Image (tube, rainbow, N blue to C red):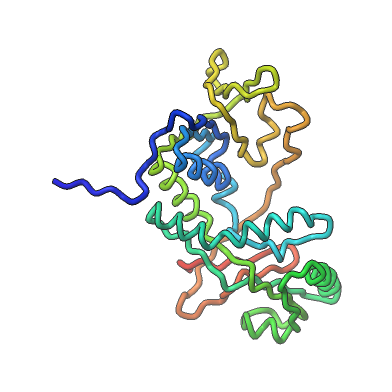
Amino acid sequence: MQHQTSSRSPNRPGPNRPSVGIIGAGVSGLGIGWRLASAGCRVDIFDRGEPGQAASWAAAGMLAARAEAEPGEERLLALDLASQEMWPGFAAELEADSGISVEYRDEGILIVALDRDDAEALRFNYDYQTGQGLDVEWLSGAEAREREPFLSPNVCAGVFSAGDHQVENRKLVEALIAAFRKAGGTLHGNTEVKAVDTEAGRVRGLVLAGEESDVRPYDMVVVAAGAWSRNLEGLPKEVRPPVRPLKGQMIATQMDLAAPLLRHVVWAPGVYLVPRNDG
């Protein structure tokens, strides 16, 4: 029997590569872990629940650097735009490594206003976005309905951002898990990290819940626990992330793919609608 290997076979940890412990198996933790494991690092990812089943699973998958640009976040905007430019290549490489489509969609995002107050707020954001050199387009209500015919007649204005795209976040998580494992990384689900262990200002490793008397040694630690990162013990106050969880509501409905009600991600005040390839 012949055994075939892929062109990107799992890398065994190299003697000069650091060992890395990652806290959090969402999109960020998995993506970082995949890249590090592919580079030959020994990587362990720990998640207190099922990997990829928290915020990354419940997200809308929007890649909206332009639509979400706000005053005072110019440095973040530059980073977001650079990241977004890398996304098509990243998605293609991930799909090739994992064999899983992440359903990357590039038809753009439509933001709509339902009354004059909404339109004024939308115009303010639009003026800021164009002032930053972003390629967004102002639409009348009629022009917005040309792009999405089932929009309410109350829609009085819109902004179309062709450069903002979308990915199916649940497929993205599945692909990252597959690619990370294929690269030789180890995933620890339902395993809570209690603390980051440090000595003389340097990381020594991680302490797992239930293993308080032991330290799992790592050369480097990555904190990617999202809204729960601030709860980790051992982090100095000056680097403790100032984040907290927010609760939202989500509803999933089915639509006929032969005559879809929605073709773009649509934002309205307080809500957004996200089409999926499976309807």
In the image: residue 65, left or right of residue 187: right
Q: Is residue 278 above or below residue 260?
A: above
Residue 269 percent across, percent down from the top left: 75, 66
Q: How many marks?
A: 0
Displayed quadrant of residue 163: bottom right
Query: Which is nearer the eye, 219 or 263?
Result: 219
In the image: residue 96, left or right of residue 244: left
Q: Is residue 159 above or below residue 70?
A: below
| Farthest top residue in view | 213
Residue 205 percent across, percent down from the top left: 57, 23
Which residue is rendered at x = 72% and y = 69% of the image? 268
Which residue is rendered at x = 43% and y = 60% of the image? 101
Query: Which is nearer the eye, 120 or 177?
Result: 177
Residue 126 percent across, percent down from the top left: 79, 71
Query: Which is nearer the eye, 273 or 76?
Result: 76
Which residue is rendered at x = 67% and y = 25% of the image? 233
Displayed quadrant of residue 154: bottom right
In the image: residue 59, left or right of residue 118: left
Residue 67 percent across, percent down from the top left: 71, 65
| Farthest left residue in view | 1
Q: Is residue 42 above or below residue 176?
A: above
Displayed quadrant of residue 258: bottom left
